[in-house]
């Protein structure tokens, strides 16, 4: 992978990780957003859907952060295949 491509991947993955972090915080801060947006209560008030979304977003944030760390500027770029 070229240096420019690794840098692009770093910025893309870092931006997506930040977006997932913000989305996770928003879901945890305002857990009834689905009811407000759709006008219905898909989990019948249990909050299970909101927790599933928050956990999924947090997992995506961790995976994207790890990927961004791997492609960070200054990291060694392996040319072996």
Image (cartoon, helix red, strand yellow):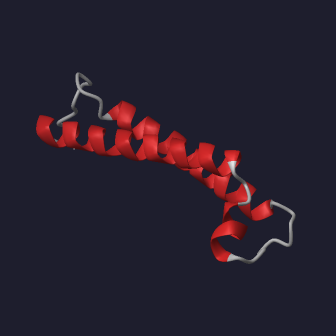
Indicate the position of residue 14 as horizontal and vertical percent values: 37, 39
Indicate the position of residue 62 as horizontal and vertical percent values: 53, 40
Name the side, left or right, on which 79 lies relative to 70.
left
Indicate the position of residue 36 as horizontal and vertical percent values: 68, 67
Residue 2 lies, with reference to residue 40, above or below; the image says above
The residue positioned 81% from the left and 60% from the top of the image is: 47
The residue positioned 61% from the left and 42% from the top of the image is: 25
Residue 43 lies, with reference to residue 24, above or below; the image says below
User: Which one is in front, 70 or 81?
Assistant: 70
Indicate the position of residue 68 as horizontal and vertical percent values: 36, 36
Query: In the rendered image, which quarter contains the N terminus?
Result: top left
Residue 9: quarter of image = top left
Name the side, left or right, on which 12 lies relative to 64.
left
The residue positioned 65% from the left and 75% from the top of the image is: 38
User: Which one is in front, 70 or 37?
Assistant: 37
User: Which one is in front, 19 or 29?
Assistant: 29
Whether residue 2 is visible to the viewer of this picture, yes or no, is no
The residue positioned 40% from the left and 47% from the top of the image is: 16
Whether residue 53 is visible to the viewer of this picture, yes or no, is yes
Query: In the rendered image, which quarter contains the C terminus?
Result: top left
Residue 58 lies, with reference to residue 70, above or below; the image says below
């Amino acid at each position: 992978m070229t240096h420019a491509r690794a840098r692009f991947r770093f910025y893309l993955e870092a931006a997506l990780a930040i977006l997932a972090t913000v989305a996770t915080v928003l879901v945890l801060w305002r857990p009834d957003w689905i009811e407000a947006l759709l006008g219905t209560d898909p989990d019948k008030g249990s909050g299970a859907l909101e927790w599933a979304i928050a956990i999924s977003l947090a997992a995506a944030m961790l995976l994207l952060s790890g990927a961004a760390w791997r492609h960070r500027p200054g990291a060694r770029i392996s040319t072996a295949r």
